[in-house]
Image: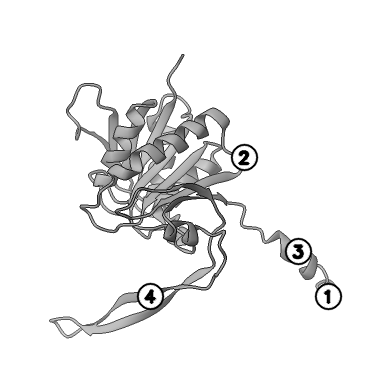
Amino acid sequence: MKRPLILVTNDDGITAPGLRHLIRYMKEIGDVVVVAPDSPQSGMGHAITIDSTLYSKQVIIDKADGAPLEYSCSGTPADCVKLGLQEILDRRPDLCVSGINHGANHSINVIYSGTMSAAIEAGIEGIPAIGFSLCDYSWKADFNPCEPWIKRIVRQALENGIPEGTVLNVNIPKTEKPLKGIRVCRQARANWREQFDKRTSPTGKQYYWLSGEFELLDTGTDTDVHALEQGYVSVVPTQFDMTAHHAMSQLNRWKLND
């Protein structure tokens, strides 16, 4: 049988350890083509390049036999997927995977995530897509515990399909204990309590450095944050139709046309 074609991307850059691990896992499942940013693009959300030039070139990072085709892109994670689908791949991929992100993309973080935006861009184009994140921000994070869980989720996605209009947001906890399993969850209600640290440069100019603390506003036991705290891999089905359907009936009661 023909092996599935898997488009691999990320937001931490083409040399990021998380991406290199994900490529290795996917090579065991299908034929892999990599299109990833040439530099870190964390927190870019769904930004795309529209007012400057966009560059892409083939690169050789893995020199082993059977290494996949790899392309670096000067743009954002969403740019990488657009370029991969429209200019680089010679056929439609069966799956797009993004990651493995260095750091959590649970709860509200999904809004800012370049990792998930790459997956969502593929989803918008009708490509089944999954974003993977490890809850460890270290560049030297241990990604090895992720392998069996990522492979299991990818194989199930290829076998069963992902519901239309849905992208999977997968987070893997950082823990020294064996992971307990996988839980399908809802996105936890949370926020960032942010503040700007006002500083002065050596030349006397004022600038700001964003910092903040994660604030969990949800006590539910069916959330991604709770699953991760309990030692489970969280899987949140995420939709890119942002319509608040539950609010439409209330808004229709407003006197908008009187």
Tell me where residue 161 appears, x and y as whole percent: 57, 33
- What's the CA distance linking mark 4 and mark 2? 35 Å
Q: Is residue 185 left or right of residue 213?
A: right
Q: Is residue 243 left or right of residue 120?
A: right
Q: Looking at numbered disc 4 in the image, what kind of residue is underneath it?
A: Glu
Checking the image for residue 255, the label placed there is: 1
The single residue placed furthest to the top in the displayed view is 1
- Pick the residue in front: 111 or 188: 188
Residue that label 4 marks = 213
The crowd level at tag 2 (other Cα within 10 Å; few <14, some 14-19, many 20+) is: few
Q: Which one is earlier in the sequence, the residue at label 4 or at label 2?
A: 2
> What element does badge 3 sit on?
helix
- What's the CA distance linking mark 2 and mark 1? 35 Å
Checking the image for residue 164, the label placed there is: 2
**Foreground: disc 4 or disc 2:** 4
**Foreground: disc 3 or disc 1:** 3
- What's the CA distance linking mark 4 and mark 3? 33 Å
Tell me where residue 87 appears, x and y as whole percent: 40, 32
The crowd level at tag 4 (other Cα within 10 Å; few <14, some 14-19, many 20+) is: few
> What element does badge 2 sit on?
loop
The crowd level at tag 1 (other Cα within 10 Å; few <14, some 14-19, many 20+) is: few
Residue that label 3 marks = 248
Q: Residue at x 41, y 31 (%)?
A: 6
Q: Residue at x 53, y 28 (%)?
A: 159
> In this orientation, does residue 73 appear?
no
The crowd level at tag 3 (other Cα within 10 Å; few <14, some 14-19, many 20+) is: few
